[in-house]
Image (cartoon, rainbow, N blue to C red):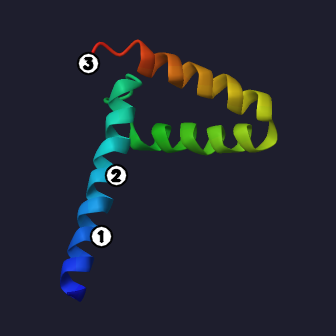
């Protein structure tokens, strides 16, 4: 039973990572260097932590991108 639970946890983790990678592709950043992607994410965290307005602005941009998704 423990092994099944660990397997389910690994599957869930893998699915989450694939979804997060899909966001990188959706944003048009597929071919960017990993260091740049990490830098963007680190900078983004500092921006949304310091400024609630920035969090709301970026959320609106992301929501619009999902809404306009042709898939």
Relative to residue 47, is residue 63 depicted above or below? above
Q: Are marks 2 and 3 in contact (CB under 8 Å)?
A: no
Q: Position of residue 28 (x, y in %)?
A: 37, 22
- Mark 2 vs 3, N-terminal side: 2
Q: Which mark is residue 18?
A: none
The answer to which of marks 3 and 1 sits earlier in the sequence is: 1
The alpha-carbon separation of the residues under discs 2 and 3 comes to: 19 Å
User: Mark 1–mark 2 contact, CB under 8 Å?
Assistant: no
For disc 1, the neighbor class at 10 Å (few under 14, some 14 to 19, many from 20) is few
Q: Mark 3 sits on what residue?
A: 71
Q: Is residue 42 above or below residue 4?
A: above
Q: What residue does disc 1 label? A: 9
Identify the secondary structure beneath mark 1: helix
**Rendered position, 1 above or below 12:** below
The image quarter in which residue 53 lies: top right
Q: Most extreme residue toward the front, as rendered?
A: 1
Q: Position of residue 11 (x, y in %)?
A: 23, 62
Which callout, 2 or 3, points to the residue nearer the camera?
3
> What residue lies at 26% left-to-right and 18% top-to-bottom?
71
- Element assignment for label 2: helix
10 to the left or right of 24 = left
Helix, strand or loop at label 3? It is loop
Q: Earlier in the sequence, mark 1 or mark 2?
A: 1
Q: Quadrant of residue 66?
A: top left
Say which residue appears at 78% left-offset and 35% top-offset: 52
Left or right: residue 68 compared with residue 46: left
Tell me: 63 left or right of 16: right
Q: CA distance from mark 3 to mark 1?
A: 28 Å
Distance from Cα at disc 1 to Cα at disc 2: 11 Å
Residue situated in front as seen by the camera: 67 or 38: 67
Q: Which mark is residue 16?
A: 2
């Amino acid at each position: 039973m423990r092994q099944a639970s660990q397997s389910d946890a690994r599957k869930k983790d893998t699915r989450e990572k694939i979804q997060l990678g899909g966001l990188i592709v959706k944003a048009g950043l597929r071919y960017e260097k990993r260091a740049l992607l990490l830098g963007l994410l680190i900078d983004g965290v500092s921006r949304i932590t310091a400024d609630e307005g920035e969090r709301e602005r970026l959320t609106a941009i992301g929501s619009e991108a999902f809404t306009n998704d042709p898939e």
